[in-house]
Structure formats: C-alpha cells, structure tokens
Image (cartoon, grey):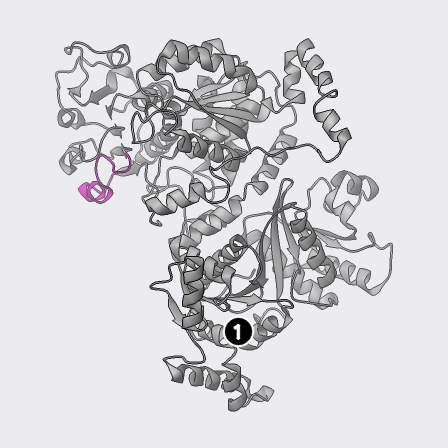
Amino acid sequence: MSTITRQSALEYHSEGKPGKIEVVPTKPYATQHDLALAYSPGVAYPCEEIEENSENAYKYTNKGNLVAVISNGTAVLGLGDIGPLAGKPVMEGKALLFKIFAGLDCFDLEVDEKDPEKFIAIVKSLAPTFGGINLEDIKAPECFEIETRLKEECDIPVMHDDQHGTAIISAAGLLNALELQGKRIEDVKLVVNGAGAAAVSCTKLYMALGVRKENVVMCDSKGVISVSRSGLNEQKLQFATDRPIKTLAEAMVGADVFLGLSVKDVVTPEMVQSMAERPIVFALANPDPEIAYDAAMKSRPDLIFATGRSDYPNQINNVLGFPYIFRGALDCGATAINEDMKLAAVRAIADLAKQPVPPVVNTAYDMTDLHFGRDYILPKPLDPRLLTTVAPAVARGAMESGVARRPIEDWEEYDERLRKLMGYDNKLMRRIFEQAKSKPKRVVFGEANTDKMLKAAVIARKESLLIPILLGNEEMIEKRAARLGLDISGIEIVNLRHDREAPRRERFARQLMLEHQRDGVTYPEALEKMFDRNYFGMMMVHLGEADAFLGGTYSASQEIGRIAREVVGIRPSYSHFASMHIINTKRGTFFLTDTQVNKKCDAETLLDIARLTRNSVEYFAHKPVMAMLSYSNFGSSNEPECRNARQVVSNMHEMYPDLLIDGEMSINYAMNKELRDTTFPFNRLKGEEVNTLIFPNLSSASTAYRMMLEMGVGDAIGPIQMGLNKPIHYISVNSPVRSILNLAAVAVLDAQVLQNSGTLIDK
C-alpha cells in the first residue's frame, strides 16, 4: 500500500478544481434554441407533466439517478464529532464512490443540526430532489431514530450506511465462513464487541439470517450487556443476556463467531484459543483490528479471520455494497431499502465469492489463483462483476417485496445497461494501478528531460506505482525538477553519454552486435547506437537491468518502433506487432487498433493485429466483440482493402470459432446494432454491442482515436504495444501527464506478467 502523507492528500483535494466532484450538463446548450428548451419557455412543459403525475419526475429530471449523501458530522470516520463542514471531504468522497462504482450522480449535503427532530425535518423537506438518501456519519443513538423516521416519512430509499453497509457485507462473509467451517447459522454462538450503530445493525441482520437471540452476547466498554445492568438504552437492552458472565474473555469461551466493531487490541490470542472448534473472527476496528492479523492466525490453524483492512485477506469493505444497493433500488423505483433487499444483497455478494474469479481480478491483487476458501470469503472491491450481480439482486428483492414502482421487465436489457456503466467510470484503469502498486517494477523513462515525462516519473514514484530510472543529463534534469518544484531525490539518473559504468555501453553494444551480426551490424555501429536513448533504454530492459521502457516521441513514432523490433524483437508466433488504445466513454469501453505501428496493412498484417487485439481485450477482462472496419459492407466493394478485411474475418472464424467478429463494415453499422442487424441480419454480431474496432490502416485508426480525444468523447489508455518480447511502450512527450502515468502502469503490469510467467501473455 502506498503511503498517504498529509501533504499529498491536501494537494489531491486542492489542485486544479478544489474538491472531488462537479456538475456536468447532459443536454446540448450551444444555441439559443438549446437554452430555450433547457429553461424558459421550454422547461414549463415538463413542469406541467410532473404536476399532473409526480412519477414523470423520473422521466424528465435526473431524480432517478440522483442520491444525496447527508450528514451532520457528528461521527466522521475515526475523527468523531468534527462538525458538518469539516466532514464535507468525506461526503464528497462518498459521492465520488457512488459515481465511479455505480454511475450514480450525487450531491453531498452537510447539515448543521444535531437535534434529531430538526434534522429529520430538514432532510424530509429536501427529499423531493432525490431518488435516494444515503445518511452518513451520524452518531448513535440519534442515528437510529433519524433513519427510522425518515424511512417512514419519505417515499424514496433511505439508508444509514454506517449501520447497514457493514452489516450487509459482513453478513455475506459470515454465510460463506460458516459454510467453510461446516456450521449452521441457527446453531452458532455469537459474541459482538461494540454496541454502536454498526454493531446493532450487524446483529439484527445476522438474526434475520438465522442467528438465535439467545445465542448472542453483546459487549460494550463496560463489559457484557446483561439484564443485571441498569441504565441501558433501548438499543442495548434488546440484546441484554441473562447469562452470568461479565467480561469479554468470559463471553468468548466456546463462542463460534466473534464480531468486533470497537477498538484495537481488546482480544488476546488466549481468547481466540478459548473459542469453539473452527471459529470465525471478524475484527473490524479501523485502522487497527481488535486483534492483530498475525497474532490471530498464529493462535490456531482452524480460524477464519477478517478485518476492515485491504492489506489482509477477507476485507469487510462497505464499497462492496452501497453503490450497487442504491443502483438497484433507484433503477426499479423502490420506495425503500427494506430487509428483503438487504438480504438479497447479502446473498448475491456471498454467491459471487463462490464463482470462478476472472483473470483481471487475480491480476489486480497480484494473485494467481483466487478462489473460494479460507482467505477468500468475499469478492474483491475491484471485481467488475459486483455491479451486474448486486444491483439486479436488489431490484428483484424490491419487486418481490412490493416496493418497486417501476419494475424491471427486460432483464437482459438491464444487464446490458449496467455493463455500459462499467466502461465510463474507468474501473479498468483503477485495477491496473492497484496491480502495479502491488509489486512496483523498474521503468526507464527515455525522455526524462521533458516536463511531462519528468512529472509523470516523479508522481509515479510518489504513488508507489513504479521505480523510475531517468535517462538524461543529470544537471539538466535537476534544473528542470527545481523549476517544476519536483523532488527527485533518490531517483536514479543515467547519463548514457557519461555513464559512470562506461563498460555498460560497450557491453550493450557487444550484445546487440552478437544478436544482429548476420544482419550486417558491426561493433562500431552498435556502439554508436548506444548513444541513442531508445537503444540504450531498451537494452537495459533486454538485459535485465530494468523491467520496462517508456519512450517518448516528438512527432512520428515509426523510428522508435523500428528500434524496438530490432532490440527486443517480435514474439515468435507473430510477424508483426501493433498498438492499441483503450477509450473509456459514456457508451462503454472501446478498444481501437492499430493506432500507431503498421502504416499499410495487407491480410497477413491485419490478421496479426486481430489476433493480438483479441488476446489483449480478453486480458483486460472484456469479452471481445470485434468489427473489421472499412468503407464497404460485407462485400459491397471488391477493392484490395475490403478483400483483406473479409479474408481476416474468415481466418479468425476458423481459428476462433466462438469469437464474435465480423465485417468488413463501415463505422455506422459497427456502432449501431439495430441498424446493422436490420440491414444485415446474417451478421455474427447480432444483438451484441461492438467494443473492439480494427481499422484497415494506420491513418484511419490514428485519426479516429485522436478525433475522439480532441472532441472530449472519452479518456484514453495507450498506445499499448502488443506483440513485442519485452515491455516496451512509447508515447508522445506532449501527452497529458495522466496519460503517461496510465501507460507507465500498463508497462509495470507487463513486467509483472513477464516475471511471473517467463514470457509476456499472448496479448
């Protein structure tokens, strides 16, 4: 895990536009006609429709996709009662999570009111604006009354995530842990340490799943909550036991399950050892659990252990639930989030953990064989299947329990809509970054004497994304860093013209000469090439002195591609290499090839590009639906370019019978499935949305992706080189720093794969 410093966090929140969220128009507004439709006089018509039927608000406004995150700042994270304004960064962060994980728009509202009655009145008066309300960081016991009343008095979903989020996720983990331990939920003895909002909600949900009340012992800071104690509030009294025990240690003897929502180090190894056979311990105090992971695991071999931390197995993380619960609730017009919906979410999350884990999830967490078991009782937060698993389950729960005003009728269409949401929020890039950070690699930056490359290298080091090696003149790089305010202390700088290890240049030259002497390369020629940053940096990777190379281009990239072919070579199963751009758009994620390498494409070249693209799309956890593009459609022209595309489609069908690929076709038929399927009903892509576009030549591919970026259609990852023997990538030195960082993360991912398998994945 990367270290989060105070300064880096403050810079993150303040740089550029302050804060983490903004409002973006969704309709045209360029002309006077647009503005007249958006406001006066056009806006009057939807107002009249809503006045006539309030349900029309979901048709004509964003109410159905809008959640409020509301707090009074009385229990903010581990900071306590810091007030509503100080809690605003947390609420903005929650709004961001709603957007990136579930595509839900969000307003954060910080209410300066501690009196429950007044707070309820304020929130209730705001409810017409929203499709759902997420209450956040409100202290107990007031939070119980506030949530209960608002659920009764509002006709939209209301949930206090501090209570129910942890309950839902931990309940899913509990079901799976009990299955692995061979225990029935109605038989287990449960000890809960902590009596706040989350502890109460967790216990109630466990009881709804089958835990018997007589088998529950709850403790607070004073010990066991028992009927012999006086002054218990209503929430604690409902869990008071008549057992003659007073301490947590006594309660733990013979217990099957321990749930901690309290403070660190209150559980000892001896307490764990006193539990029943095959125990389950959920120590969820943050940042430090009730018992340290190592101490718990050493205490006994039959333990299943979970915490709230991401650096240990079995993280109980609320983000597995709340974005998708609200997504499903809003999509079916639910009037509440009830027990049926929460239980549906519990079972969906639990079931997902039992499914085969896609490669991208293994890669994101630096694993090779994640599977249901003692160290994997819950899905990982970056699992892309959560949205399409949990949201539909919640919507079904709402419909079956009678609270859905707009029941979903076409589940296939709904699943497709959810999958589209998965593209725009850049989950893919987040997974790549998380994987890169898990095992940083040495990346050579070939053009470190340029502002953006140097910034990217420093940020990447700061984020623990990689270990940078800068090629260039030390004095020039240091001056540039000082001018840009960058800290480059501790970063290795290699001046290939005055390298302190002069024999290295000679050694690189001898190796290049030996490998290419039959191609006419002499030692003096090879030595001269070692003064070129691209040759030198790639040779560092080729000979294992670095793990990946990130070159910079100024205009044409053909020369650096030629050098890559010469130094590291193309993988044996191909005759060409190619580049791909991944574009994240509101319509989803699109893969475009070949955007950088092959100027002219005959059938053999296009076939290599198609094969490489197929493997890459699958590697990035997407099902490829591929269109071979042209200006013609399915044989309407017999020009060589069109024949080449048709030949490649035929070859790909033969090589990969189950692959969804067809063409040749023009871009409008590729992007409009209804038009394509109506006009060409025989096509193999029928009913599918194309996500992979293979262009007939470099000119069209490069023009297409650059036009998309300039028009603000989406964000890009790339160019990703496919087919080289080593992790060699290159990008324009004028690209945005974020784009350079994205490609650097891909380079690290390639290096990790190469280290783990001995060869780059066939992508």
**Left or right placement of residue 657 versus residue 430 in this view:** right
In the rendered view, tell whether residue 445 sits above or below residue 209. Answer: below
Query: Which of the 4 quarters of the picture holds residue 422?
Result: top right
What residue is drawn where x is 67% and y is 14%? 50
**Left or right placement of residue 589 versus residue 250 in this view:** right
Give the magenta range. Answer: 286-303
In the rendered view, tell whether residue 445 sits above or below residue 714. Answer: below
Question: Taking the image as drawn, is residue 756 in sight?
Answer: no
In the rendered view, tell whether residue 498 sits above or below residue 268. Answer: below
Q: Bin the neighbour count of mark 1 within 10 Å (Cα to Cα): few under 14, some 14-19, many 20 and up.
A: many
> Does residue 290 belong to the magenta stretch?
yes
Q: In this orientation, which residue lies closer to the viewer: 34 or 676?
A: 34
Residue 224 x/y as whole percent: 17, 20
Query: Which of the 4 quarters of the picture holds residue 570?
Result: bottom right
Q: Pointer 1: what residue?
A: 534
Q: In this orientation, which residue lies closer to the viewer: 588 or 242?
A: 588
Question: Taking the image as drawn, is residue 54 in sight?
Answer: yes
Q: In this orientation, which residue lies closer to the viewer: 601 or 759?
A: 601
Indicate the secondary structure of the residue bearing disc 1.
helix
What residue is drawn where x is 61% and y is 20%? 407
In the rendered view, tell whether residue 680 sits above or below residue 337. Answer: below
Residue 493 x/y as whole percent: 40, 70
Kind of residue sitting beneath label 1: Asn
